[in-house]
Image (spheres, coloured by chain):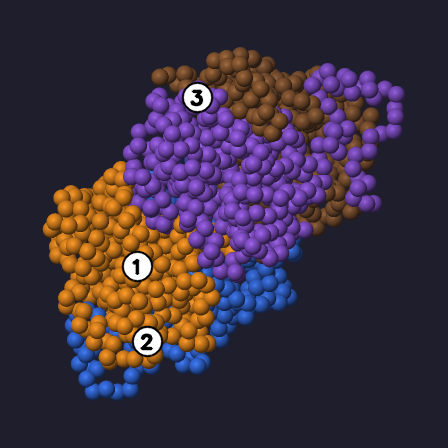
Chain colours: A blue, B orange, C purple, D brown
Amino acid sequence: MTAASSRPRPATASADLSEYFERVRQQGMGPLWKAMGELMPTTPKPREVPYQWRWADIRDLVYESSKVVRVEDAVRRVLMLLNPGLPPEQAAVTQTLYAGIQIILPGEVAPAHRHTPNALRFVMEGEGAFTTVEGEKTILRKGDVVTTPNWTWHDHGNESKGPVVWLDALDIPLVNALSGMFYEDYPQKTHPVRDAANSSQRTYGRALRPTGETRASNYSPILNYTYASAREALESMPSTAWSPTEGRVIEYINPLTGGPILPTMDAFLQQVDPGMDLKACRQSASRIVMGVEGEGTLEVEDQRFRWKPFDVMVVPAWAKHRVVPSGRTPAILFSYTNAPVMRALSLYRETVV
Amino acid sequence: MTAASSRPRPATASADLSEYFERVRQQGMGPLWKAMGELMPTTPKPREVPYQWRWADIRDLVYESSKVVRVEDAVRRVLMLLNPGLPPEQAAVTQTLYAGIQIILPGEVAPAHRHTPNALRFVMEGEGAFTTVEGEKTILRKGDVVTTPNWTWHDHGNESKGPVVWLDALDIPLVNALSGMFYEDYPQKTHPVRDAANSSQRTYGRALRPTGETRASNYSPILNYTYASAREALESMPSTAWSPTEGRVIEYINPLTGGPILPTMDAFLQQVDPGMDLKACRQSASRIVMGVEGEGTLEVEDQRFRWKPFDVMVVPAWAKHRVVPSGRTPAILFSYTNAPVMRALSLYRETVV
Amino acid sequence: MTAASSRPRPATASADLSEYFERVRQQGMGPLWKAMGELMPTTPKPREVPYQWRWADIRDLVYESSKVVRVEDAVRRVLMLLNPGLPPEQAAVTQTLYAGIQIILPGEVAPAHRHTPNALRFVMEGEGAFTTVEGEKTILRKGDVVTTPNWTWHDHGNESKGPVVWLDALDIPLVNALSGMFYEDYPQKTHPVRDAANSSQRTYGRALRPTGETRASNYSPILNYTYASAREALESMPSTAWSPTEGRVIEYINPLTGGPILPTMDAFLQQVDPGMDLKACRQSASRIVMGVEGEGTLEVEDQRFRWKPFDVMVVPAWAKHRVVPSGRTPAILFSYTNAPVMRALSLYRETVV
Amino acid sequence: MTAASSRPRPATASADLSEYFERVRQQGMGPLWKAMGELMPTTPKPREVPYQWRWADIRDLVYESSKVVRVEDAVRRVLMLLNPGLPPEQAAVTQTLYAGIQIILPGEVAPAHRHTPNALRFVMEGEGAFTTVEGEKTILRKGDVVTTPNWTWHDHGNESKGPVVWLDALDIPLVNALSGMFYEDYPQKTHPVRDAANSSQRTYGRALRPTGETRASNYSPILNYTYASAREALESMPSTAWSPTEGRVIEYINPLTGGPILPTMDAFLQQVDPGMDLKACRQSASRIVMGVEGEGTLEVEDQRFRWKPFDVMVVPAWAKHRVVPSGRTPAILFSYTNAPVMRALSLYRETVV
C-alpha cells in the first residue's frame, strides 16, 4: 500500500447516503471522511499569496491620507496592506500577520490606548516623532525598531517639522483567530512620561538590569532598537555567524530571555552582500519583508519581486523563497514573521530546498 | 474624555473620499480607521456560539455511520460536531478546536498515519479497542484519556466483540489558521508494536523515567490516563484543593513539564457534588464539555443546557459559564480547552464573574 | 609546547622571595602561582574514598542504638555513615552527601521540624512506620522512597508492632559548604494531618494535578514512590530504554518538571539481569549505592565490592565504576547522587570508559 | 514545648555509651544525635569573617609581584585575597568565592588555558591590556567587566605602555567543594583570534543575535561590559527602579536568559548618592565588594569598614550589612556574589533587617 493510497476513499455510490448526510447535517454534524482531504493536506496550504507593494506606487496615497482624516478621528492614521488571497475584513497581510503604513504630521498626537495585539514599527521616512510606552518616551529615527507589546499603554506624536512615516507590524489576525482581542482607551489623550528618554535602551539594551525593578519577561523591555546599532552589528558580524540562507542577519532579541522581541513575532535585519549566493528555503512561518537600502530580487515560489527601499513583500507560510543581491552595494532588508507562535506550539519547521 | 469617545470617528462626509478609498483599494490597501471598530473590539467576539449535542439525539447516527462507510475507506470513521456559528468547511467546534465522535467495529483497523494536529480521545462506549502510538499499544476502557501528539505515528483497531465509540478532540482549526498542517501516511497499514502494553503508563504515569531514554518534553509521554485513576484522584482530593469555580477538578498533566497534556490543549476531569455552589467565570479560552456520569446544568451566558452522559457542549471564548449540579449523585464532566495556546502567547485571561 | 609544560613553574631560587611571601601573608594574601597546581588539578580530586558498609557488620549496632538513646532525646535516632576520607565532623559520606541508618521502635514519634537540607529515605526493614510531610501522611513499606524536601514540616513515627529501619539520604555537607543551613522546630511534637493518606501519590503520582492547588515546582509533590511501582516499571521497560552503563534503570522524577526528585539529589532504582555486560563510566557526581535484592559486585576504580542487600557503597566523584551481576537472579540496586547540583551549575560531565 | 527544647538532648550519663560509640566509630559510623547541634544550626554559620583589604596597604605588594615572578612561570601573576576565617590552602575569600589581584606588564602574554571555574575581572588600573576568549579579543579599560566562563579557552596580554591591574573573581572554592575541577592547557601560548574585536558586545550587548550562530545560554555571550555603559545606566535609572537596600544598582545580565552573567556568580555596579538612607539586609549569599569611585562606609554586622577606591571587603553569608554614603559625590561600588548557586538550589533567602 502506498502512502497516497490510504487517504479517504468515499465509498462508491450508494443510493441512500445523501439522505444520511442530510440527517447528520440537521444534527449539527458532518462526516469527517468527506472533508479530510481538504482539511488535512500533506503540507500547508495558506490562503495568503506572494505579493509586493511598491513604495513608488503607494507613497502618494500614504501622504494623501494625512489630508483626508484627522489623527484624532482616526486614532491611528494607517493604510493597511491587504493580501489579495485573504478577505479584506480580516485586515491581514498573511493569515496571522498585519502590516500597515502610518503617517503622522507635525504637531499631531495619536491618542493613548492599549490592546492585546503586539506591535512593532520600523521607521521609514522623517525623523523626530516620538513614541511613549508605559511612561517611557523615545524619539524615532529612520530604521529604528520600536516595540509596543501586548497590553502596554502607548501613544505617539510628532514634535518635528515634517511628516514621519513608518511600517506597523502587528498580529491582529492571529489574535482574532484566537478570540483573544481586548482593547482599552486611556482616560487621557497621552500617558504621562515617567522615565528618562530611552532609559530601557540604556540599561536592558546593554545587558544590564536594575535590580530594584522586576518586569514580565514575555516581551522585550527595550523600547527602541536603533538602526545604527543593528547596522553596526551586521558589519562586524564574523563570517562564521553568517546564515547560508539569509546571509548576514541579526534578530532583535528580548534580553530577558534570549528569545524573540515579542511573544508572537520575531524581527530581523539582514544584509546580503553583492555576490552572496544564498540557498532557498521554506519555513512554516509567514514572513513580511521590507527593502531598506540597496536593491535586489526576492524570489517567492515562481515569482521574482524586484525591490527597492520600502517595498513590502509577502512570503507565505512554507513558500520556497530566496534573496538574490544585485547592484554594487549591500542590500539591507527588514523582516518579521510569526515563527514564535509556531515554535511555542511545536509547529515550526524549516528546510533548505 | 471617556474611553469610548476615543474610538475612531470617520470624518464627516467629504465628497471625494469614496474616490480616494477606491484608489487605495486598487493598490491592495485599506484604511485602518474605517475597520478598527470591527477589527479591535474591547472584548473577544468569537464566532462560535454556545451549543449542545444531546447523545440521545446523535447516538443512532454514530452507529449508523459504521454501516455507510468502511474504515479502510474513511481512514477514520467520524462524525464531526460543527458549531453553527462557524463555516462547516472549517470542521470547527470552536474557532480553534475540533470535536468528533468516532466508532470502530470488531475486527476493524484504522490505517496508520501522523499529522501535526494534536489529538486526544475520551472513550464513551464499548471496551477493548486498542490504540498504538509510536510502537506502544494500549487497550481502551471507558473513560480513559488517550493522547496522540503532534507528528506521532498512530493507528487503532478493535479486537473486542462489540463496537467502541469515543470522542476525538483535536486542534485542527488552529493548525489550519496557522498554516501548520503536515500529514503523512505510514507505509504499512499498522505501525509495528515495539513496547510492552502500557509501558509509558507504568513508568511516566508513576513519576518514573527510564534514564536510557530521552523524549521530547513538549507532549506527555503517557499514552493512556485511565479513568479509574482519575476518578480515584477526584475522590481523595483534599477540600483545600477544590476550585471555587469548578469544584473538584484534576488536570491531566505532562509529567515531563507539569504542564498540559498536549502543547495546544489541556484536559480535565471534574466532579461537582450535590449542593456545591460554584461561581461563574470567563476564560479567554474556548472549552468543550462532555457529561460523563450523573446529570446537571451547564449555564453558558443566557443559556441553560440540561445535560446527561455523553452530551457535548460548547463554552465559547470569554463566555460566562457555570456548572450547576443536580440530582443526588456527583456529576462527572470531562472537558478540554485551548488554554495552553493562549498562555503560550500571553493571551490567557480569566475572571470570576 | 605541551599542555603540561604551561603549568606554573615557580621561579628558580631567588634569595628574597620568602621575605616577600611573608609580607604578602601578613596582608591576608597569598601568591596564586604557588598554589595553582594543588588548587586546580586537571581532573577532580575528591577527598571521599571508595568504601563499603556491610549490612551484616552494622545491623546489630543500628538495632542497639534504639536502646542507648530515646527518640525524644535524639530527635532522629540515626547512625551516620562517615567516609574515612573526610573529617568526621562534616557528617559526610561524600563531599556533598550524607547517609545515615535510622531506626524507630513501635510507639515512638520523632518530633516535627524542618530544615533547608533535602531528604529522602529508602525503607530497609519493617513495615508500618509513617511519615507526615506538610500535613500528608504515608505508611512506609519496604523499598518505598519517601521525600522530605527543603523547608517542609515533617515528623514520623511507628504505629506498627516492630522496629522499622531505613536509609536517610540528605545533602547536609553541601548545604553547610554553601552556608545555607536553616533549621526550625515545630511548636508541637507532630504536625497536624490534613490530607487523605497518600493523596499526593494518587494525583501527582498518576500525572494528574488538582487545578485549585498550586505548588512550588522545585521539588516533587509526591510524598511516597512505592517499591511495587518502581519494580514493575523495571520489569516492563522495553530493551530500547536500557542503559549501556547501568542496565535497566528508572529515575524517580518530579512530575511538575520531569527533573530530579529533589533540587539537589536524584535517585534511581536499577536492575541488572544475570549476564548483562555493562560498561564502566565516570560521572562528575558522587554516588551512594545500596543493594536491595540479589547480589553482585560493584567495581570502583581498583576496588571490587561484593555486595548483598542493604550494603551501602560509595562511588566518589569522577571514579570509574561498573556494576557486575552475579548469581541467577536480577540484582536490584538503589542509588542517589548530587548530579542535579552539578547540572544546575553547568559542572556535570560523564564519560563511558 | 518550645522550639529550642526539641533539639537533641544526649541521654543522661550511662556507663557503657562510650564503649558503644567506639564500636560505632570502628565501623565507620557516628551517632547523629551527638553531632546535630553543630551540624544543623538554626541559621547559617559561615566560616568566612567580615574583612577589608585596603588598596593603600596592598598596592605595592601587587606591583612588586611583577618583579618576583615571570608571567610565563606563573601562568597568572596574582595575589589571592585569603579570608582569615578559612584555611589558606582553600584559596577562599568566602566559602565558595575566590578573589585575587592580577598584574600584567607591557609585552607580557599569559598562556592560554581553560577550566571549569567561571571567572570575571574588574579592571582597576592601567589601560590597554587585552583578553581573548574563544577567539574574540577585547581591549580592557578601567571599570570594564570581562567574563571568562566555564571551559572557554582564554588568554590575555598587555600591548600597552604600562602595567595593568585588575580584580579576578572566581568560584574556585565552590568548584573544589563540589569536586568539579577540570583544567586544560591550550597547545599554543595564545588562542587564535577569529572574530572582530568586541563583536559579542556589538551584537549581544545590544540585544541583537546573529541567527546563523547558536551559543549555549548558560553563560553570557558578552565578553566585555564597559564601564561607560554601566555608569550611564546608573545615571539614567528612574527612581522607581532604585532599591531600598542598595540604592541605584544594576546587574550585569546574560542577554540570552535575563539571568546572571555566569551560572555561579552574579555581578553588580552600585551607586549610592550622598544622603541616601539605605536599609540593612541579610542574604544567604556571600558578597565581595570593591570600592570604585568616591568613598563611604560598609557596615557588616558590628564592623564599620571605611573604604576608598579599590578596597575589597567581605560580607559573609547571612551577615547583616548596609552601605552608608559619605562625602559629596556619589559612591560607586562593584560587587559579586554566589547568589545564582543559592537560587539554583532553592537555598536563596534575603531579609531586610
* Quadrant in which the C terminus of chain D appears: top left
Q: Is residue A329 above or below residue C225?
A: below
Q: Earlier in the sequence, mark 2 or mark 1?
A: 2
Q: Position of residue C305 (x, y in %)?
A: 64, 42
Q: Is residue A231 visible?
A: no
Q: Is residue D30 visible?
A: yes
Instruction: Specify whether B208 is left or right of D22.
Output: left
Query: Do the residues indicated by labels 3 and 2 lie within the same chain of the protein?
Result: no
| Residue B144: mark in rendering | 1
- Residue shown at the point (66%, 35%) measured from the top left: C49
Report the Cα–Cα distance between label 3 and label 2.
Answer: 68 Å
Residue type at tag 1 = Asp
Seen from the viewer's position, the closer of residues A321 and D70 is D70
Which chain does the residue under circle 1 lie in? B
Seen from the viewer's position, the closer of residues A98 and A104 is A98
Q: Position of residue A174 (x, y in %)?
A: 35, 58
